[in-house]
Image (spheres, helix red, strand yellow):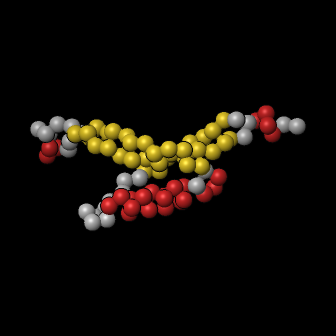
Amino acid sequence: MAREFSTRSFNPVVKESQGGDFISQQMEEAIQKGTNNGWEFHSYQTVQVVVKPGCLAIFSGPRITNYGVIVFSREVPSIEAGRS
């Protein structure tokens, strides 16, 4: 059976005093929200993005930054499965 995928950005912001448990709680909440409507948690990925500078920062060149993405998936019924 085929699967389809959906992504949600996840880039937690924490204070220095909050630590890993706070991040875990935020991620758990994001996964719980994402598993509505038949979606299943698939993975967490880090995506590197090249950010081009704006007009005022032309001499600094591009910079690389990371973004977090939570990936969800669900089964897609095939056309054949619907036929009897």
Answer above or below: position of 83 versus 41. above
Q: Position of residue 15 (x, y in %)?
A: 28, 64
Residue 58 is drawn in which quadrant? top left
- Residue in the picture at 36% in, 58% down: 20
- Residue in the picture at 51% in, 55% down: 31
**Can you name the residue that lies furthest to the right here?**
84
**Can you name the residue that lies furthest to the left here?**
59
Q: Position of residue 47 (x, y in %)?
A: 37, 40
Quarter of the picture containing the N terminus is top right
Q: Nearer the viewer, residue 82 or 73?
A: 73
Q: Position of residue 63 (x, y in %)?
A: 22, 39
Q: Position of residue 51 (x, y in %)?
A: 26, 41
Answer above or below: position of 35 versus 47. below
Q: Is 63 situated left or right of 4 in this image? A: left
- Residue in the picture at 59% in, 49% down: 40
Residue 84 is drawn in which quadrant? top right
